[in-house]
Image (cartoon, grey):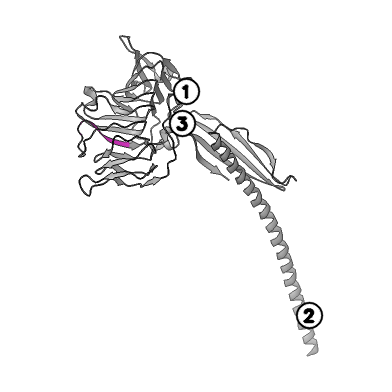
Amino acid sequence: MGKASLILVMGFAVIFSIIRLGFNRANTDIAENFVYYFDKESAHGVAVSAANMALAKLAETGGSWNAGYNNVDFTQNGKVKFAVNINRPYDVETGQQLTWVYCKGFYDTDTASVTVLLRDQPYSKYIMFNPLPGGFYATGDTIDGPGYMDNGQLWTRGRPVFKDRILLSQAPKVEAVPAGVVADFRGGWQILAPTQRVPNVGNASDLVSNAGYSCTKNLYLEFFVGADGKGMVKHKLEGEATYATDTLSVFAPSGVIAVNGNKDVHVKGTVKGKISIYATKDVWLDDDLVYAETDLTKSKDMLGVVAGGNINITDNAANNNNITVYGSLFAMSGNVQAEHYNTRPVSGTLHVIGGIIHEGFTATADAYNNITHGFHSWYQYDWRLLNQMPPHFPRTGRLDIISWLE
């Protein structure tokens, strides 16, 4: 019995010794793992902090800051440091000014990285931007895309349809005409928009300086697709009797056509390729202005139309029974409007597939919601404009985050 007890005690002693050794090893592993992951997460936290500091600097300077940070020491002992490098390439494919922010965080011997891609936010991002009071959206009007308005109060009568979220500086004025019939905000509206005005003509400097074609006379353009499938343009200056014809890539190799000297552009046709048109005075839409490929999920066509004054829908036979325009339309100090809007007959529907940015707003209906002259509005957003833009299109001075990689 004594011998058996001794063997039993010795067995338990060996077992508990093994268990204790396992616990000791586990405790050691836990401590080592804690230090390992603490150092890695600390380095990651430093990199994220560096990214946020860099984005704050970019926001303060309107995106112009490019000094970066060179191994800044948080603790003065070299244990916690960070570095930021800035690269600002122009992406020809998407027509955008990009900003790459490369951030590194250092904690002891560990390193972590954060890479942020931003773009200069273009006005073309919005389907509707800053219409002033003086008009309203009515039954029959459809806005299918994100909108932004802070110049005044959005006014609706009857049942216009807003399919996406609308950012506002104050609650909309919604009138039930007739009783019980009110605006349909399917994406909702949000009081969020900070003060941001449509820019003046000075903001077109990027278009002017990057023009592939420029002139100081009234210009007439008609786009079409050639027999070989290339984008083509017929063009003539005021006073010229006949049109000349060129491929779009030869006529405006940078993708920008600029008319200076307080002159106008008249435009119509079918666009193949990417192009921005700018006039220091007015742009006249003489007929439909559409893409060669109208399926926007496949299309590589993109158009920006920018006027220092108004963008006018010409009062002519072609435009008296609807007009369709693809592209982002930007009237810097005026309206996107129908010529003779207060006297021309009811002309159908203005179809815009892209967006409208303008300083003003012209009414086409009476107080009872009846279209009396001009056009109904039907705006459909080109969702490619969330991450692309027409060549050298004016920008808001803000930055959009496209991606954040850790």
Name the quarter where the N terminus is drawn: bottom right
Q: Which of disc 3 and disc 1 is earlier in sequence?
A: 1
Precedes in sequence: disc 3 or disc 2: 2
Secondary structure of the residue carrying tag 1 is helix
Q: Is 340 in the magenta?
A: no
Tell me if 192 is positioned left or right of 159 in this view. Answer: right
Amino acid type shown at disc 1: Ser
Percent coordinates x, y for residue 10 in the rendering:
78, 80
Where does label 1 land, which residue?
Answer: 205
As shown in the figure, which amino acid type bears the numbered disc 3?
A: Arg
Q: With respect to residue 91, does 40 lie above or below? A: below
Residue 391 position by quadrant: top left
The residue tagged 3 is 395
Q: Are marks 1 and 3 in contact (CB under 8 Å)?
A: no
Q: Residue at x 48, y 20 (%)?
A: 209
Pointer 2: what residue?
10
- Relative to residue 223, is residue 89 drawn left or right? right
- Say whether residue 365 is left or right of residue 384: left
Q: Nearer the viewer, mark 1 or mark 2?
A: 1
Tag 3 secondary structure: strand
Say which of 191 and 402 sits in front.
191
Q: Indicate which disc, 1 or 2, sits on the residue closer to the N terminus.
A: 2
How far apart, in angstroms, are the residues tagged by discs 3 and 2? 82 Å
Kind of residue sitting beneath label 2: Met
Residue 301 in percent (x, y) is at 39, 29
Q: Which residues are magenta?
A: 371-379
Q: Please say if the residues under marks 1 and 2 sit with CB atoms less than 8 Å apart.
A: no
Q: Is residue 152 above or below residue 390?
A: below
Residue closest to the eye, 403 or 66: 66
